[in-house]
Amino acid sequence: MARTRNHAAHAIRRDEILDVAERLIRTLGYDAMSIQSVQDELGCSRGALYHYFASKEAILGAVVDRMTEAGMALLQPIADNPGLTAVEKLQTLFNAGGNWKSQRSDLLIPLIRGWYQPGNDLVRVRAEAAAYEQFRPLMSQVLRQGVAEGTMSVSSADHAALILTALLAGSTEAMRHMLLDRLDGRVPYEEVERFIHAYDEAIERILGLPAGSFTLLDDDAMRTWFA
């Protein structure tokens, strides 16, 4: 008779593996984390670990997926808040996302360093595509409200959300590289400020917002990451 999987137990064990992986990434860095180090922390066999994840890269992808789910769980209630205007929602979404990431900088910085190592390209592209696919409907929701309120001048909220999401994906990629350059002393802080403000202007123009009304990354978050 075939064995049936205990899905609750499977999910708990999977999360235990990811908890250990996150801790090792924080303390050792992604490159130094190995399948063996995860095994040693868990006290399990390699076969048991491979039952959940086929490779170190698969663990990395799952860590990022779990973080994305947690981030979306934080952002969706903001988009659904009936007490906020669309412009307030837009800024609150980015402030909340920036603060959430800043609180996890000890994990995200070593993750970003590992993200661009050879062999991780497919994992990165897949995870990023999934993250922005979740984010785009939320952005459409906010832009439709902005059009209805008359505060955002776009002819199609859904198409504008698609364009804005693509712009944000590009900005995230560029900011990661700038962060690594900044950490390694290759870029002055003033260059980071000019770069971020250029994105502020681009987003304001796409949505027809007044100049100076939107900030992609507030000063506190910018200093946390780049100063």
Image (cartoon, rainbow, N blue to C red):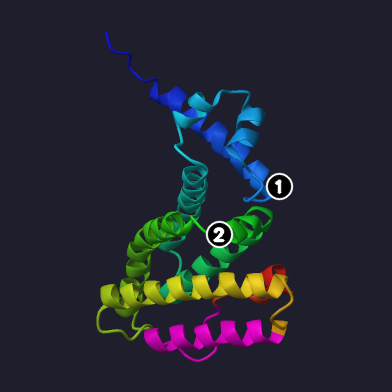
Q: CA distance from mark 2 to mark 1?
A: 15 Å
Left or right of 61 in this view: 226? right
What is the three-letter code of the residue carrying label 1?
Leu
Circles 2 and 1 in contact, beta carbons < 8 Å? no
- Classify the position of the C terminus by image quarter: bottom right
Task: State which region is magenta.
Answer: 190-215
Q: Secondary structure at mark 1?
A: helix
Magenta stretch, main secondary structure, is: helix
User: Residue at coordinates 48% horizontally, 40% vertically from top-left?
Assistant: 55
Residue at which label 2 appears? 117
What is the three-letter code of the residue carrying label 2?
Gln
Residue 220 is at least partly visible in this image: no
User: Residue at coordinates 61% horizontally, 88% vertically from top-left?
Assistant: 194
User: Residue at coordinates 30% horizontally, 84% vertically from top-left?
Assistant: 154
Q: Is 220 part of what is drawn in magenta?
A: no
Q: Secondary structure at mark 2?
A: loop
Left or right of 149 in this view: 226? right
Residue at which label 1 appears? 28
Q: Position of residue 173 (x, y in %)?
A: 50, 71
Say few, some or many: other residues with alpha carbon within 10 Å of mark 1 (under 14 / 14 to 19 / 20 or more): few
Q: Position of residue 47 (x, y in %)?
A: 49, 25
Mark 2 or mark 1: which is in front? Answer: 2
Q: Is 207 part of what is drawn in magenta?
A: yes
